[in-house]
Image (cartoon, grey):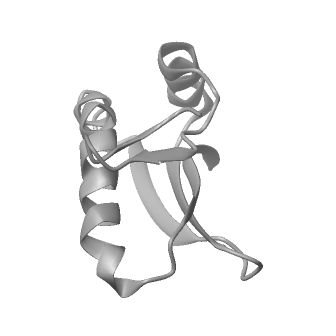
Amino acid sequence: MYKHRIIECIVNDSSDYDYVYDSAVQNTLDEYFRWADSQNGAVSFEKSWGEPSYSLCLQVDAKFEDKDTYALFKLVYGNKPYNKLDTNTLEFTHA
């Protein structure tokens, strides 16, 4: 299985922000979901939290069943993870 990090962002450790983070993940990944649907189930997404340290880190990875789909994904979307939350648009962006 191949894996690619889409989002890796330090976030506030308050439960008051859960809705904001979930909405931002959905909004950011909307285009990725549509692309994954066209790949006939060869792509899945996994949300996790980084290792406990100074700050909480939200991580979202795309997981691929085969290397061809993985390679196509990297050609279409690049390889730099989103690392900043835009609270105005509720999307993750590149800083």
- Say left or right for 19 vs 5: left
Seen from the viewer's position, the closer of residues 41 and 87 is 87
Where, by quadrant of the figure, is residue 17 drawn? bottom left
Q: Residue furthest right?
A: 53
- Say left or right for 85 vs 67: left
The number of discs equals 0
Residue drawn 43% across the image and 83% down it: 14
Residue drawn 62% across the image and 31% down it: 67
State the image coordinates of residue 70 (x, y, percent, origin top left).
Answer: 56, 30
Taking 55 as reference, is 33 above or below it? above
Taking 24 as reference, is 51 above or below it? below
State the image coordinates of residue 47 (x, y, percent, origin top left).
Answer: 46, 64
- Say left or right for 10 vs 89: right
User: Residue 79, can we see it?
Assistant: yes
Seen from the viewer's position, the closer of residues 5 and 15 is 15
Taking 10 as reference, is 19 above or below it? below
Residue drawn 67% across the image and 74% down it: 55
**Quarter holding the C terminus?**
top right
User: Residue 64, can we see it?
Assistant: no
State the image coordinates of residue 13 (x, y, percent, origin top left).
Answer: 51, 80
State the image coordinates of residue 15 (x, y, percent, origin top left).
Answer: 36, 85
Seen from the viewer's position, the closer of residues 64 and 78 is 78
Q: Residue furthest front?
A: 88
